[in-house]
Image (spheres, rainbow, N blue to C red):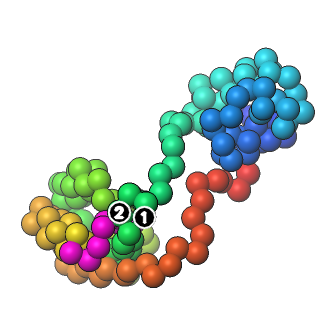
C-alpha cells in the first residue's frame, strides 16, 4: 500500500522517533494538532508499513556487552544455497545486531555486540563452523561517536 505523507505526518513521525512512549496528547501538542487526527494518521502509517515494530532501546554497556565489532566478510561462495545457510546462521546469532550485503571488495559487514574479545572469538568460531567463509576481518570499535535510530525525515 502506497501512502502519501505530508508535513504533519513528518512531524508526528519525528515525535515518535524521539520517544514512541509518549501519549497521543503529548504528540498532538508537539505537532500542533488534536488527538484524534494524530491517532488516525498514526494508524494509517502503521497500516501502510511506514511505522513498524515499537521497541525499547537498551544500553549495551550497562548490560555487559562492552565490545562492538564490525566484521568484514569475503566469500568465494555465491550460490543460493550458501546464501540461505549464511542468512539463517546470522538470524540465529543474537550477537549480530546488523548485517549488510555490500558492493565492492567486501561481501558482507556485520555489527556484532559481545562482552569482550573472548566472547567475540566464541562467536567467530561458531560462525566459521557453520558456513564456509573465505576471509574474515574483525574491527573493534574503540568509541561510539554517534548512534541513532532516527531517520532524517
Asked if residue 87 shows in the view, the reply is no
Q: Where's residue 145, x and y in %? A: 58, 75
Crowding at mark 2 (Cα within 10 Å: few <14, some 14-19, many 20+)? few
Q: Quadrant of residue 125?
A: bottom left
Q: Which residues are magenta?
A: 111-118
Q: Are marks 2 and 1 in contact (CB under 8 Å)?
A: yes
Number of numbered tags placed on the structure image:
2
Q: Nearer the viewer, residue 49 or 96?
A: 96
Q: Quadrant of residue 128?
A: bottom left
Secondary structure under tag 1 reads helix
Residue at 52% of width from left, 73% of height from top? 144
Q: Is residue 86 above or below residue 135?
A: above
Crowding at mark 1 (Cα within 10 Å: few <14, some 14-19, many 20+)? few
Asked if residue 32 shows in the view, the reply is yes
Q: Is residue 134 above or below residue 101?
A: below
Q: Nearer the viewer, residue 105 or 73?
A: 73
Residue at 71% of width from left, 56% of height from top? 152
- Toward the top, the furthest residue is 36
Q: Where's residue 84, x and y in %? A: 23, 52
Check if residue 116 falls in the magenta segment.
yes
**Mark number, residue 61:** 1
In this figure, which residue is indicated by the disc labeled 2? 64
Q: CA distance from mark 2 to mark 1?
A: 5 Å
Q: Where's residue 131, x and y in %? A: 15, 64
Residue at 60% of width from left, 59% of height from top? 148
Q: Is residue 13 above or below residue 104?
A: above
Residue at 57% of width from left, 64% of height from top? 147
Q: Quadrant of residue 120?
A: bottom left
Q: Where's residue 92, x and y in %? A: 23, 50
Amino acid at each position: 500500500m502506497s501512502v502519501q505523507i505530508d508535513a504533519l505526518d513528518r512531524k508526528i513521525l519525528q515525535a515518535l522517533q524521539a520517544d514512541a512512549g509518549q501519549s497521543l496528547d503529548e504528540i498532538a501538542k508537539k505537532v500542533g494538532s488534536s488527538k484524534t487526527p494524530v491517532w488516525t494518521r498514526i494508524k494509517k502509517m502503521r497500516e501502510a508499513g511506514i511505522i513498524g515494530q515499537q521497541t525499547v532501546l537498551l544500553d549495551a554497556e550497562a548490560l555487559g556487552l562492552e565490545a562492538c565489532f564490525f566484521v568484514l566478510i569475503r566469500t568465494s561462495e555465491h550460490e543460493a544455497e550458501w546464501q540461505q545457510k549464511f542468512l539463517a546462521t546470522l538470524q540465529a546469532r543474537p550477537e549480530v545486531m546488523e548485517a549488510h550485503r555490500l558492493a565492492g571488495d567486501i561481501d558482507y559487514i556485520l555489527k556484532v555486540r559481545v562482552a569482550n574479545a573472548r566472547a567475540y572469538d566464541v562467536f567467530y568460531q561458531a560462525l566459521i563452523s557453520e558456513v564456509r567463509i573465505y576471509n574474515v576481518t574483525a574491527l573493534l570499535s574503540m568509541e561510539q561517536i554517534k548512534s541513532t535510530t532516527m531517520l532524517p525525515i
